[in-house]
Amino acid sequence: MLLVTGCGQASSDLAVIKTARSLAAERALVAKLDEEGKLRRAYAGGMQRAGVQQLLSGRNALSQPEGAAGQAIGAAAAVRDEAGALRAAALQLARIEAQRENH
């Protein structure tokens, strides 16, 4: 029974990490388009705020919110609306995602 529960949590955590990686990448794209003047400032700000809220919600859904994945998700949420820094956060989450998929 514990093994099944553990697998379920690992699967759930992986889904959260994948979503967080996607959200960080989306925030990076919004920041890039905003930096290029291709989005209205209010729209970009709303998208960024929604992304941060979703990241924080995902972190809290992890089985270990204070673990490495939770810290990376928290860091992605804390990054300012700057494309390069958000891309780096998305890459960090992609590395964690790949590690989890390989175990």
Image (spheres, rainbow, N blue to C red):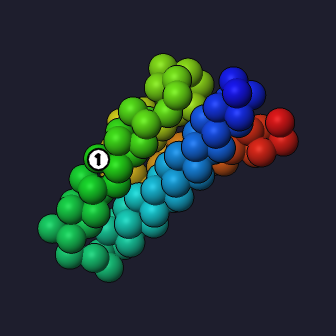
Q: Is residue 66 visible?
A: yes
Depth check, front residue: 80 or 48: 48
Circle 1 sits in a helix, a strand or a loop, which is it?
helix
The residue at 22%/60% (across/down) is 45
Residue 102 picture location, percent across and down: 84, 42
Residue 27 picture location, percent across and down: 41, 58
Q: As shown in the figure, which amino acid type bears the numbered disc 1?
A: Gln
The residue at 24%/53% (across/down) is 49
Residue 2 picture location, percent across and down: 69, 24
Locate residue 9 relative to residue 75 in the image: left or right.
Answer: right
The image quarter containing residue 99 is: top right
Q: Residue furthest left?
A: 42
Q: Quadrant of the C terminus?
A: top right
Q: Residue furthest bottom?
A: 38
Q: Quadrant of the N terminus?
A: top right
Q: Is residue 77 visible?
A: no
The residue at 32%/79% (across/down) is 38
**Mark 1 — residue?**
53
